[in-house]
Amino acid sequence: MPVSNAVTQFREDVIKKGGPQIASKYRVLLLGAGGAIDCYPISVVLPGRIFSLYEHDIWGPVRKIPYKRGYTQCNMTFLIYQDWRERKFIERWMNEVVKNIDTTSSSSSSLPNYNNSNSSPVFPSIASGVLAQVSESVETQNSLFRLGSSTNSQTSNIYKDYVNYLSGKGLIEIETLQSNTNSSTTCNIKLYEAYPATLSPTTFAADGTGFASFTVGFQFNDYLLS
């Protein structure tokens, strides 16, 4: 087949598939414990997939049999706008996943009351031999793991952390858009039981000329690509 025919056929095949997906055509919806937010991160790294393998080695070449699936994290990098909208949303979400409670505060807020001098949280001190340990009682009914118990009753009564996984998990939806018009979705990726697991530091500097940003690593339990 002449070269011109091969190029023509390749072009027709690409057109039939709608053309290549442009990397900058996407949008993101975060549905977390702090509500919902439509956003456009600077970059989105879709998760990869892996299998845990069992090596069956009785005779001949080793046969590797997959028995468990796993995923890498989904990483997103956000610009910090002057309203700090995305950063505040992630902070609220992470505060819901692992909460702080000042048990001496009369406020219904889940955050410690740092303004009340009489109820300032007392953090465990290694020097005094007080170390926070996981409580022996685990409430399996609502998967609430209580932390912060210690040999110091004053410490354990004032400051407690607890994991709030069931209420803290959320949904992340990533849509890739049609390259020409942005009017329709070419692919939809949903991350289930998702939550922000890592939040990178943000650097400000007097001689800085760029824009402030931060990266979030999202953990999840399953995803669907459709």
Image (cartoon, rainbow, N blue to C red):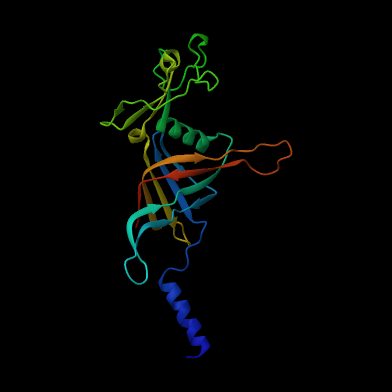
Q: Residue at x 45, y 73 (%)?
A: 14
Q: Nearer the viewer, residue 158 or 95?
A: 158
Q: Nearer the viewer, residue 71 or 196?
A: 71
On the question of residue 184 being in view, the answer is: no
Q: Is residue 111 above or below residue 60?
A: above
Q: Residue 12: x and y, percent? A: 44, 78
Q: Residue 21: x and y, percent? A: 47, 63
Q: Is residue 70 above or below residue 171?
A: below
Give the image quarter of residue 15.
bottom left
Farthest residue to the left: give it: 141
Q: Residue at x 59, y 35 (%)?
A: 82
Q: Residue at x 42, y 53 (%)?
A: 175
Q: Residue at x 50, y 61 (%)?
A: 22
Give the image quarter of residue 226.
bottom left
Q: Is residue 142 above or below residue 209?
A: above
Give the image quarter of residue 172.
top left
Farthest residue to the right: give it: 207
Q: Nearer the viewer, residue 202 or 183?
A: 202
Total labels drawn: 0
On the question of residue 172 being in view, the answer is: yes
Q: Residue 105: x and y, percent? A: 43, 13
